Image (tube, grey):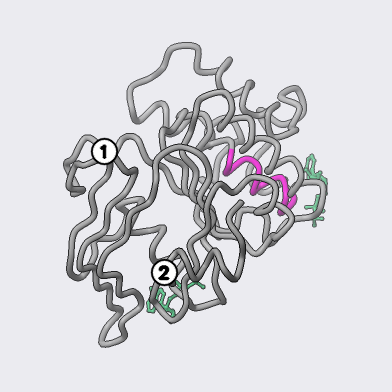
Amino acid sequence: IPLYEIKNLIHKYGEKVALKIDNLTISDRGVTALLGPNGAGKSTLLRLLALVEKPTQGQIYLRGEPVGPFCKAFRKVTLLPQQPYLLKRSVFENIAYGLKIRGKKKNLRQKVCEVLSWVGLDPDQFLHRPWYALSGGEAQRVALASRLVLQPEVLLLDEPTASVDAKSAQLIKEAVTKAVSLWGTSLIIATHDWAWINEIADRTLYLIKGHVLPSEMSNLIFGPW
Ligand code: ADP
Ligand code: ADP
């Protein structure tokens, strides 16, 4: 059973069709890379897959379950947007938030410290640091940690390394790899980082102007990894 199935999907912003996918299956497990030029529809697709936006038309299935606001699948998926939003609070509050609203308050501090060290931030230094005292790369790593702490079954990442320094990018990649190998998290990543795609992608999806290239064509151009 596939991770996602998309049928007869059209997504519009006003009159503009941002995405049109008649039929698409995304395999479960491992890493799917979403490729394509800016404006191709990658972020739109990720938001739809994360259920934070509802398609204008069509249906999305997550492991066979039609997705909607009250479906169980909703709890399994989390998205790290391209410009993640941090709460105007401490690092701890930012990372603990998702667990708190889900009522998971056991070992909160321990869980937060664990994912913090995954992203290379020493809890002694960072746990109580306010949001405004983080560099761009540190803020992005805190945002990733806030998603990892949920141990999501499906993790959707929108250009997570695009606007950070090289060291942060490396730490982000390592943390993501760790989640996949430790928890079997299914990953879908929009990225332009070719070296990373080569390293971790099990399959690629190429988008252009709101359409998905057939996989044979995508493989021809980009190779199956
Ligand atoms: P990508 O992530 O591949 O760069 P996007 O999904 O961000 O592409 O954008 C796909 C198309 O939809 C673009 O033409 C973009 O301008 C448009 N679009 C995306 N989000 C919005 C929005 N919130 N309002 C209006 N247009 C949007
Ligand atoms: P950049 O501008 O390069 O993104 P900053 O100048 O904001 O980064 O921060 C540089 C370093 O100083 C970062 O490691 C950041 O965590 C730390 N830092 C910034 N402000 C504070 C603060 N008020 N207290 C402690 N550390 C801080």
* Mark 1 or mark 2, earlier in chain: 1
Callout 1: few (<14), some (14-19), or many (20+) C-alpha neighbours within 10 Å? many
Q: Secondary structure at mark 2?
A: loop
What residue is drawn where x is 38% and y is 58%?
Answer: 47
Kindly identify which residue carries mark 1: 73
Is residue 48 within the magenta segment? no
Kindly identify which residue carries mark 2: 214
Q: Position of residue 85 (x, y in %)?
A: 52, 53
Q: Which mark is residue 143?
A: none
Q: Nearer the viewer, residue 94 or 18?
A: 18
Q: Quadrant of residue 124?
A: top right
**What residue span does the magenta drawing correspond to?**
135-144
Q: Vertical placement of 89 versus 166: above or below?
A: above
What residue is drawn where x is 50% and y is 12%?
Answer: 107
Describe residue 39's horizontal placement relative to residue 212 as left or right: right
Q: Position of residue 212 (x, y in %)?
A: 40, 70
Describe residue 179's horizontal placement relative to residue 51 as left or right: right
Q: Vertical placement of 43 versus 74: above or below?
A: below
Residue type pointed to by label 1: Ala
Q: CA distance from mark 1 to mark 2?
A: 27 Å
Residue type pointed to by label 2: Pro
What residue is drawn where x is 61% and y is 35%?
Answer: 91
Task: Tell how many labels.
Answer: 2
- Of marks 1 and 2, the one in the foreground: 2
What residue is drawn where x is 47% and y is 42%?
Answer: 155
Callout 2: few (<14), some (14-19), or many (20+) C-alpha neighbours within 10 Å? few
| Quarter of the picture holding the N terminus | top left
Q: Main secondary structure of the magenta part?
A: helix
Q: Residue furthest bottom?
A: 15
Q: Nearer the viewer, residue 84 or 45?
A: 45
Q: Quadrant of residue 194?
A: bottom right
